[in-house]
Image (tube, rainbow, N blue to C red):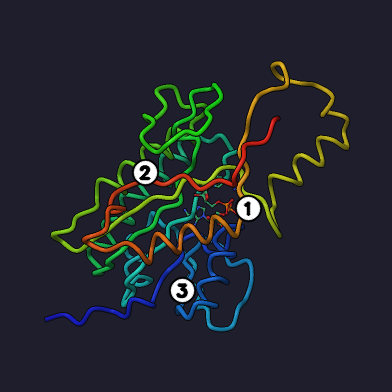
Amino acid sequence: TRVRPSSKRCAVIGGSGFLGRHLVEKLLDRGYSVSVFDIRQSYELPGVTFLQGDLCDKQALLSALKDISLVFHCASPPPASDDRLLFERVNIQGTQTIIQACIDAGVQKLVLTSSASVVFEGTDIKNGKEDLPYAKKPIDYYTQTKIEQEKLVLEACDKQKGFLTVAIRPHGIFGPRDPQLVPTLVDAARQGKMKFIIGDGTNLVDFTYVENVVHGHILAAEHLRADSPICGKPYHITNDEPIRF
Ligand code: NAD
């Protein structure tokens, strides 16, 4: 019989990114041993093993996932690239490769970073729950592939095989080292591009503090057991109140 790897051995795919690095730091604090798998290495941290590779490369993944019991998948091409083929290759085919590699490597749990935009149809959602349907007309290619990716991961949940999955859906993540959200808004404001209101000024948008997103991921991972109702389900993680935008 095969010895199950320790439940405190995890890998963070996309661990060099904004969210990934915060997740890695918190996992270390909580006593996990962490491997990062990413196409780039953006920092050094004692106790973290870095493996550089493309998540579409199954062989590279298999060596990174050896003896790992828990995988966080928070890698994605930047939404702003709007590169349909790249999104399809990485978010859809790459996620299929991750699922297969996890199963082959004996990984027990996979936590996906999805996005709240998978249910966004272009109109305000207030108190939206996870039972909202997937957007029929996603707002862009990125979101379209995030929907497909989430379906693949949640459908792969298999209690019999001992492979459990869950998805976390944040929206607009902000916090220390945010490379995107706040800097883009500040730049736009500096260039005088914040003088216009789209709509009547009552549009709503959610932002999520990065540590809350991290907390949601770790809670999901630690509660993911065969007898848990969270198996194969998505969860929105946002701050309390949407902001008028
Ligand atoms: P990020 O760009 O900072 O990090 C993504 C990481 O993925 C990068 O380090 C990148 O090198 C890596 N990556 C990309 N392609 C890869 C590949 N082929 N193989 C291996 N690694 C690859 O992005 P982020 O803001 O930290 O986002 C993390 C996750 O959260 C993504 O799945 C994103 O869709 C989701 N998300 C982000 C936000 C947000 O506001 N930032 C909101 C909702 C959902």
Q: In percent of the image, x 58 and y 45: which residue is there?
A: 78
The residue wearing badge 2 is 150
The residue wearing badge 1 is 209
The residue wearing badge 3 is 35
Q: In percent of the image, x 48 and y 42: which residue is there?
A: 115
5 in relation to 157, above or below:
below
Could you say which quadrant of the image residue 158 lies in?
bottom left
214 or 48: nearer the eye?
A: 214
Could you say which quadrant of the image residue 32 lies in?
bottom left
Q: Is residue 55 left or right of residue 39?
A: left
Q: Secondary structure at mark 3?
A: strand
Q: Where is residue 15? Give x, y as percent.
A: 52, 64
Q: In percent of the image, x 24 and y 69: which residue is there?
A: 106
The three-letter amino acid code for the residue at tag 2 is Glu
Q: In percent of the image, x 52 and y 46: which residue is there?
A: 170
In the rendered structure, are the residues bearing label 1 and label 2 in contact, judged by CB atoms less than 8 Å apart? Answer: no
